[in-house]
Image: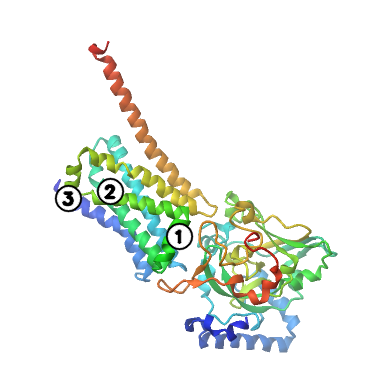
Amino acid sequence: MKQRASKPSRIAASDITPPERYLSRRAILAAGVGLGLAQGIRGIVPNALGQAAGAPGAALAYTHNAKYSTLEAPNSYEDISTYNNYYEFGTDKQDPAQESRSFRTSPWNVTIGGEAEITGTFSLEDILKPHALEERIYRLRCVEAWSMIIPWIGFPLGDLLKRFKPTSKAKFVEFKTLYDPKQMPGERTSVLDWPYVEGLRIDEAMHPLAILAVGLYGKAIPNQNGAPLRLIVPWKYGFKGIKAIVAIKFVEHAPRTTWALSAPNEYGFFANVNPAVDHPRWSQASERHIGAGLFAARRPTLPFNGYADEVASLYSGLDLRKYF
Amino acid sequence: MWATRWLAKPAVFVACLLPAMRLTAGAFGMLGVSLGADPVAALLHGCGRWTLNFLMITLCMTPLRDLTGSVWPLRFRRMFGLFAFFYVLLHLSVYVFLDQKGKTNTVWQEIAKRPYITIGVLALALLLPLAATSTTRMMRRLGKRWTQLHRLIYPIAILGVCHFWWQVKSDIRQPLLYATGLTMLLGYRLWRQRKALLRVSAARFARPDAA
């Protein structure tokens, strides 16, 4: 996010990435570029991803995308991988890290369907093959009024969607999580209506900020964070970021998404981060930043989670109180 | 009596403090205790949970006396009740000072605006007179009215469980557990009262002058 550099008032001194962190980030980057030069960047990506699908925690080759990364200091790997909302693996924040340990992410298939010229079931390797990976350091705002900064590794969702040539009837994109109660203990309960479904309007899905993530902190994404493939839409509440995706479908009408079905007055289809529209049971005006410590001040929540310059135009003329 | 006063009571007292000590240690990262990535939420929910636990434990003492035929449980009832009060004060302090950072304006707004907070605060307010009249002197001074006043524990516990239930996103299993426990504890009292009434009317019916 370039605008952060030009609006220093929004950044606290403590938010700036400490030098040892960005220096090490550059070292990773240099290593990645070096490898890329030696082998041709296209050549090594599927290789790295082959590892990603098979071995969580395997190192990935990627380039850092500064244009779309915030300068704020990322949360620790520990915080990001032990504090998760992933009800398929339990409703306590620490459940997913415990319960997803033996989750199998390989082999993994993704079914592409609906209003597109190319449809079918594809292996994860085929899905990922043409895409170069980028690091995007994004802000994450949970609907529960806490936030983190997360260095995802992924690629633009739009680039993937275009490969399947959506037709003019493709007005929305629907995503589904794996339904496998044997592996996902939460799916044996009726806490939510399984499988988890999420959706985006097609223009939202094509926005360059919307990515599919396969990695975290330069390594293959941990199971509890949505391995092997998850959605990140940084200007929306975290629950839009569907995990362990097995189906992507182009559809004409807005999909019925899981949380909106569960409590329609509390969770909308759009779920854009909006400090002016409260959750019926709590305020969305400010957030507790994870990792900031017991006595740190709450941070004001920003419209579209700080990405208003990039995405507000998608919603011009839309009543954001009604379409929350 | 000596053993209760100088051994059992201090031991129970310390045991009741353990959750607070664990949470405090976790808050400051001492003794290897960690509260995870979001310590404020852990403290808030931890203190709230222990308030409910102590309300339940307090309500268990009368049935326990009836069941065992020993008055022993009643000797600890006041301590448990006061610990419920202690944990709810911690819960409120964590909310006001750590979660809302002492912004009293926001706190008042939230209390007024969010029904689950409103009823939580109401439950706490109802606990105040009970804590204030918990001394033996007050007990003697109020006599029969003390018993009546302290029946407030029933609506307080109901409000507490509702407060918990209302803020859950979708997984109601934990609040359901408390609601079930509370229903049993209050149901027992209704049943006992009904039985006592029946006994009284039966006794009256059996009196020769009633015939």
Where, by quadrant of the figure, is residue A225 drawn? Answer: bottom right
Q: CA distance from mark 2 to mark 3?
A: 23 Å
Q: CA distance from mark 2 to mark 1?
A: 25 Å
Residue beneath label 3, please?
A: B5
Amino acid type, label 3:
Arg
Residue beneath label 2, please?
A: B130
A194 versus A221 height, above or below: above
Which mark is nearer the camera, 3 or 1? 1
Which mark is nearer the camera, 2 or 1? 1
Amino acid type, label 2:
Leu
Q: Label 1: few (<14), some or many (≥20) within 10 Å?
A: some
Q: Residue at x 17, y 43 (%)?
A: B141
Amino acid type, label 1:
Glu
Which residue reaches farthest top? Answer: B211
The answer to whether residue A219 is left or right of residue B60 is: right
Are dots 3 and 1 on a single chain? yes
Residue A185 versus residue A268: which sits nearer the camera?
A268
Residue B67 versus residue A98: which sits nearer the camera?
B67
Q: Which mark is residue A108?
A: none
- Contact between marks 2 and 3 (CB within 8 A): the answer is no
Judging from the image, mark 2 belongs to the subunit labelled: B
Q: CA distance from mark 3 to mark 1?
A: 43 Å
Are dots 2 and 3 on a single chain? yes
Which residue reaches farthest left? Answer: B2
Q: Position of residue B182 (x, y in %)?
A: 40, 42
Are dots 2 and 1 on a single chain? yes
Q: Which mark is residue B110?
A: 1
Which mark is nearer the camera, 2 or 3? 2
| Residue A228 appears in the picture as rendered | no
